[in-house]
Each structure stands twice: as C-alpha cells, then as structure tokens.
Amino acid sequence: MAALEWSDALALDLPLMDDTHREFVELLAQVEQADDATVVQQWQALITHTEHHFGQEDDWMAATRFASGNCHSTQHKVVLQVMREGIVRAQQGDLQPIRIMTGELALWFPQHAQTMDAALALHLRRVGFDPATGQVHAPDALPGELIHGCGGSSCSDQATATQATDTAEAAAVA
C-alpha cells in the first residue's frame, strides 16, 4: 500500500484540479514502488507532471488577482526546486534523496491540498473561474487588491497584517 492514496479527503470539488491531484498521487505511488532501475524515470515523470500541475495553478492564480510572489506560488517553486535537486543527485547515482523525498511529499501533499489548494478552489468558485477556458464569469467578485497570501483566511493579507501587528505589540510590551 502506498504512503499516500487518493481519498475523498483530498477532493476539492473542482474537477480539473481534482484530476490533476489524483494523477500526482498516482505518480508518487509509482515512484514509491519503483525499483532502483526505474526510480529515476518515475521521478522524472513526477517532476514533469508537477511542473504542469503547479504551472496550471499558478496561471489560475495570476488570472484571478493573486500577486506573483504569493505564498502558494512560492511553495510551488520551492517544492519543484527540491524535486529537481533530487533528480540531479539520482543521476549521479545517489537514489536516497528521491526515496526520502517520496515519503516527505506523501506527508506534505495532503496538507498543501487541504489548505492552500482548498483556498484556491474556493476562490476560483467564488469568482466563477472556469479552469478549462480561463474565463472569469464573476469579474465583480475579483479582489480589488492583489492577493499576497495563499487565499485562505489564516494566510490572507489581512491575517498576515494582523499577525504582524500582534507580534509587534507583544514585543513592545515585553
């Protein structure tokens, strides 16, 4: 049994996103189950998928007023960079980083999907975004300012500002 399997808990009620996430889970399981002779090929397939997967979500965010440096997109960049470093190490004969990262991705992905991706899916539904066409059907629902957080209530620009204010006030009192 794979460390991560598709379940309803990962579904976000956005079919194109759910299909892409399901494929990610399947490819991750293939890497986990791959023998040493095929693991690099399987890892490269996962990277190729993930580049498209993250690029697709980043495009959706850009189309619906997320700032280019928002934390969701930044997390995508960091994860992809680490995955690419794994392939470099594997091509040098060290498969251990890929094996470790496979387990780490199985732990990371549900949290990412259930927080950042869930917030993105909610935002896309709110603005009437059609992922297949890229059309926004409720442009009046788009935010007036660019979203710098992940789009969730705990990572919104306002939550970040409030947290910074609270931290500054606590530091001033101490």
Image (spheres, grey):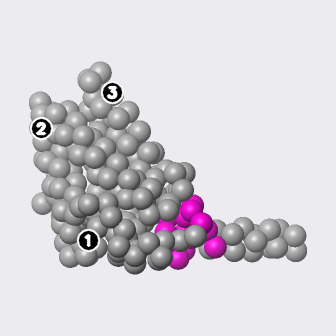
Give the residues drawn in magenta, as a range.
145-158
Q: Is residue 135 left or right of residue 39?
A: right
What residue lies at 58% left-to-right and 70% top-to-bottom? Answer: 144
Assess whether mark 2 and mark 3 are in contact (beta carbons under 8 angstroms): no
What residue lies at 54% left-to-right and 51% top-to-bottom? Answer: 69
Looking at the image, residue 104 lies above or below residue 115:
above
- First in sequence: mark 3 or mark 2? 2
Assess whether mark 2 and mark 1 are in contact (beta carbons under 8 angstroms): no
Residue 72 location (% of width, % of height): 46, 58
Q: Which residue is mark 1?
A: 14
Q: In terms of secondary structure, where does tag 2 sit?
A: loop
Q: Amino acid at mark 3?
A: Val
- First in sequence: mark 1 or mark 2? 1
- First in sequence: mark 3 or mark 1? 1
Question: Residue 88: which disc?
Answer: 3
Q: In terms of secondary structure, where does tag 3 sit?
A: helix
Q: Amino acid at mark 1?
A: Leu
